[in-house]
Image (cartoon, grey):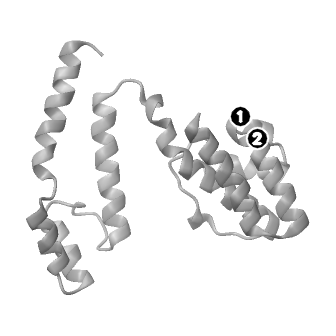
Amino acid sequence: MSDLQYTYAVARIRAKEVFLFSAATIDQLLACKTYDNCLQFLAEKGWGDADTPQNAEAVLAKEGEKTWEVVRELVSDMTVFDVLNYPKLFHNLKAAIKEVCTEGNHSSIFYKDTIPSPDEIMDRVRERDFSGLPSMMTEAAAEAFDTLLHTRDGQLCDVIIDRACLDAIYR
């Protein structure tokens, strides 16, 4: 990143800092009596937008999208942030293995914004072809799948995949 781009990025982030909640604003939020009051307070502070449903998950998701829009605007190589998506990616692997092993159909349990996508992960798990997954996931995917099939222990499956996720983050 050139000095000019760096200067712009720093200035852009500094300009965004004025919208961070102060201690007083957080106290006001905590003083809200109901869930709806909290959502209204957040909307008044600019959280979400006109199209955002009035529930906490939707508001937080919209704020996450806004944050990543700013980051994408400032950074040319987004791969440096891949590690931040590892928990979502490994969650999708756990969900896919459990879906296949239990023959469930709960598409709402997946994070949509991952590479590979939830559908690609599901296809790999259904076909038991874990080589199509990122290399950091292949061994854990095979082990977790076999473990769940043989023991029916979902928590052990989770532990195997969570360990692989933490190892990937560490690397």
- In percent of width and height, residue 59 lies at 30, 64
Q: Residue at x 82, y 63 (%)?
A: 148
Say which mark, if any, is on residue 135: 1
- In percent of width and height, residue 29 lies at 17, 73
- In percent of width and height, residue 103 lies at 79, 69
Circle 2: residue type: Thr
In this rendering, the answer to whether 28 lies above or below 96 is below
Labels 2 and 1 touching (C-beta < 8 A): yes
Closer to the camera, 152 or 77? 152
Say which mark, if any, is on residue 57: none
Q: Quadrant of residue 74?
A: top left
Horizontally, is 155 left or right of 150 in the view? Answer: left
Inspect this view and state whether residue 134 appears: no
Circle 1: residue type: Ser
Q: Residue at x 56, y 40 (%)?
A: 169
Callout 1: few (<14), some (14-19), or many (20+) C-alpha neighbours within 10 Å?
few
Closer to the camera, 62 or 169? 169
Horizontally, is 5 left or right of 28 in the view? Answer: right
Horizontally, is 162 left or right of 45 in the view? Answer: right
Q: CA distance from mark 2 to mark 1?
A: 5 Å
Q: Which residue is mark 2?
A: 138
Mark 2 residue element = helix
